Image (tube, helix red, strand yellow):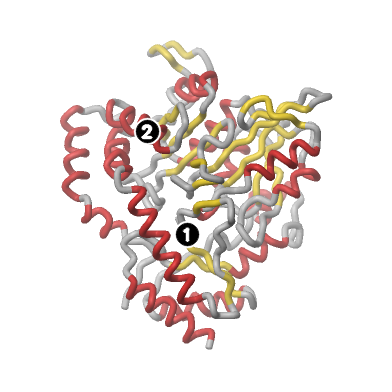
Amino acid sequence: MKVPFVDLKAQYQSIREEINSAIQNVLDSTSFILGKSVADFERAFAVMHNVKYCYGTSSGTDGNHLCLWAIGTQPGDEIIIPANTFIATVWGATLCGAKPVFIDCHLSGYNIDPSNLVKAITNKTKAIVAVHLYGQPADIEDINVQLSILNFESENTGVFKHKKTGQVIYLVEDCAQSHMAEYKGQRVGGLSYASSFSFYPGKNLGAYGEAGAVCTNDEFLADKFKIMRDHGSQQKYTHITYGHNYRMEGIQGAVLSVKLKYLNKWIEMRRKAAKLYYDMLSNIEQIVLPKEMEYARHVYHLYVIRVKSGREKRDSLLKYLSEKEISTGLHYPIPCHLQPCFSHLGYKKGDFLNSETLAEQGISLPMYPELKNEQIYYVCDMIKNFLS
């Protein structure tokens, strides 16, 4: 039995007529950049995530950059980022000329460990990027608690000012993998000063190409987002600030608007698949299953298990599953602090043990709404066969 890692064809076939019609409308209107389809999507997505403002961007990576750029990040600033994330999170900092400062993650929820913030924050810290990895929200409340220990008080959602020095630190969410995930009953995207989303095709809400979005509840920041994504311009050929071409394409807005109507249903299908994986694999001592934290509603963009005995056994299992025509993934085999491009920062193996453990033990199993029960049974049976 073949089990793909994702199956975008199956999803397209289920909504084929709606998608084709939406794309045809864009072709007929020739509104290929921004336009009505993007504006309609922005409004619907903002409502779904309970935020006041949403602006479509050309990718999630561009959204990461735009969030940090718009809050004034510049050379000399430091941006705190979990070591266990995709490198696109880090480009937001480096494209602003800022220094990424990595910290470790929890081994339970796989997200940023706020207890590490006390040692990481300096007088150069500009922002903390909370990545909601694999579809599970980071512990936002604990981040707030750790900042209060350092005498930062909240001036606004996601904005913290030091009581004595006046230093301001912004909280930014990277929601690339967590559309509609919830933290203590609140949707991600509005838990911070600024947030970014990715609509890469394989995401829970995926475009048919590159696309992303930025969100905020702050009117001043929203105006900056809108201007900076469009060459720093409010009026054509008049550029009032630095900007870039980070605009969403009309076809992507149309596709996302159609798919947005099905997102909640698809997430429930992912959650059911995750439960079946758990039921089938929970009695195997050699592996660790993902844990839904008590404060979270996980949306399972990825279902990442850990092979306790480490990289060699993990890689052998990967090879075995591939031979059985089961596609898997590695998220992420090299933590950010050990990436060659960041060697100048002076990090070394052993600095962030939890992130390194995940890199050596993690396997992402097939996960998508259309995944059939019999496919999950087959994947689980093959894992059991190998580990027995």
In this rendering, the answer to whether 320 lies above or below 278 is: below
Residue 135: % across, % down: 50, 53
Residue 169: % across, % down: 70, 31
**Amino acid at dot 1:** Leu
**Amino acid at dot 2:** Met
Relative horizontal placement of residue 262, taking residue 98 as reference (left or right): left
Judging by the rendered image, the residue that carries numbered circle 2 is 248
Residue 184: % across, % down: 56, 45
Q: Secondary structure at mark 1?
A: loop
- The residue most toward the bottom is 388
Judging by the rendered image, the residue that carries numbered circle 1 is 302
Q: Which residue is rendered at x = 56% and y = 40% of the image?
A: 173
Image quarter (top left, top right, bottom left or bottom right) of the N terminus: bottom left
Q: Which residue is rendered at x = 50% and y = 13% of the image?
A: 240
Q: Which residue is rendered at x = 33% and y = 52% of the image?
A: 265
Q: In the image, which is nearer the foreground, mark 1 or mark 2? A: 1
Residue 26: % across, % down: 21, 33
| Numbered tag placed on residue 212 in the rendering | none
Image quadrant of residue 357? Answer: bottom right
Relative horizontal placement of residue 222, taking residue 210 as reference (left or right): right
Q: Are marks 1 and 2 in contact (CB under 8 Å)?
A: no
- The residue most toward the right is 164
Q: Secondary structure at mark 2?
A: loop
Q: Which residue is rendered at x = 21% and y = 28% of the image?
A: 30
Q: Give the mark nearer the N terminus: 1 vs 2.
A: 2
168 and 49: which is toward the camera: 49
Give the class, few, some or many, for how many residues have Cα within 10 Å of label 1's Cα (few <14, many ≥20).
many
- Whole-angstrom CA distance, mark 1 to mark 2, is 25 Å
